[in-house]
Amino acid sequence: MDPSLYFTEHHAQVREMVRAFAAEHVAPVARDLDRTSTFPWENVKRMGALGLLGVPWPEELGGAGMDHLSYYVVLHELAKVDASHALTVSAHTNLGTSPIVEFGTTEQRRTYVPLLAAGTVLGGFGLTEPGAGSDAGGTATTAEDRGSHWRLNGSKVFITHAGVGEVFSVTARTAPGPGSRGITSFIVTKDTVDLERCAALGIGHAADLPKTPGVRAGKKEEKMGWRASDTRELILEDAEVPKDNVLGRPGEGFVNFLRTLDAGRIGIAAVSLGIAEGAYQEAVRYAGTRKQFGKYIGSFQGVHFPLADLAVEIEAGTHLLYHAAWLKQHGRPFKTEAAMAKLFCSELAMRATTKAVQVLGGYGYTTDYPVERMMRDAKVCEIGEGTSEIQRIVIARQILGDVVA
């Protein structure tokens, strides 16, 4: 791909900076963090110091003052080495912070965004429920107007940063009835579950930030992939949410969160493409060093044909990803393009990692090489922030309109 199609020299500098960071600080620990399912607080602190946790937010709100293309470059490069680190940045930035930036009041932005953009605390997004996954309009969490505050009751599941995070945007039903009407979004806060570790590192906790009574983290999920990322239930039990913490206009929480997910799909496409490219690069290196029958295995058609196919698909995925990112960056409609990028790149990640494991053979199935971890990390990319089936529905609705609707 010709970098000048999408990138400036600044974007190239961001890419090289993240590559160097990932090589020095992520690659040496990724295997052990995955094995032990340990959240990478030390690297979170480093990423905060580099401005990677507030890339697209303005400097007056404590951000790095860069653009969204830079943000997607960060995700892409981190995911080539470890998807869990990339997801930490993605979930924190798009899901945890962007709803407050886009829909929050001036006071809400001033209160929360500087803490989030600096990485002082981590953020999250509470939409999915036990009975509301792809059907987010099935939200059952309730919000009762108690005069001086709202009382929220419900459970959000599979929430990234539900344990380690302290600031969350969540949905709850403020009016009865089925469907998306009457769903409102709120800002809720709680303490991180890692208070002792955060105190030692000086990151992840804001003691002076008022916390929402009744908000707590549930059990940590044991996952196939993304194991160094924190995923838990977020429990709202008679949570007393101040009236000032309504995020956006009442009743518009569902519509606003769909807008958040549209942008998030570009982020998952970036993570997916990074996984695919990282696995492809590992396979190419191995094919050029491993010998069988007296020849490098890359000389055999059974090896170099699938690698050639992956090279083509990665090039196609790169254009899909950065075209969608470019549209968002320039304020143009990008819903369909984001769905296309997310669908193609997430399924590419699964194909690329499967082929990489096959190229490495028995070694690919061991933890001595990162491709088995990449393969496990790839699968959830076809599920999170809208399954592949949902992406096809989004695309088909644009093609066929009312026929699909």
Image (cartoon, rainbow, N blue to C red):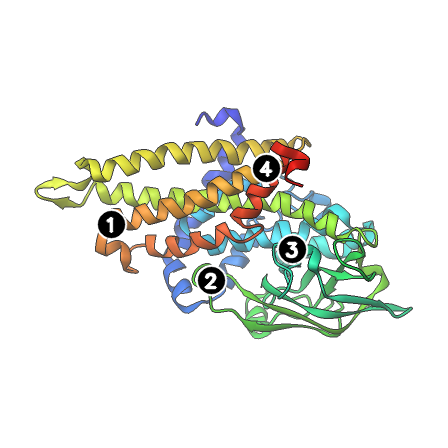
Does label 1 or label 3 sit earlier along the sequence? Answer: 3
Query: Label 4, on which residue?
Result: 396
Residue 25: tell me if it is visible.
no
CB atoms of marks 2 and 4 within 8 Å: no
Q: In which quarter of the image is residue 56?
A: top right
Query: Label 3, on which residue?
Result: 135
C-alpha gap between disc 3 and disc 4: 17 Å
Query: Label 2, on which residue?
Result: 228
C-alpha gap between disc 1 and disc 2: 24 Å
CB atoms of marks 3 and 4 within 8 Å: no
What residue lies at 61% left-to-right and 54% top-to-bottom?
134
Image quarter (top left, top right, bottom left or bottom right) of the C terminus: top right
SS of the residue under disc 2: loop
C-alpha gap between disc 1 and disc 4: 37 Å
Which mark is in front, 2 or 3?
3
User: Label 4 is placed on what type of residue?
Assistant: Ala
Query: Label 1, on which residue?
Result: 360
SS of the residue under disc 3: loop
Q: In which quarter of the image is residue 186?
A: bottom right
At label 4, counting other C-alpha atoms closer than 10 Å, the crowd grade (few under 14, some 14-19, many 20 or more) is some
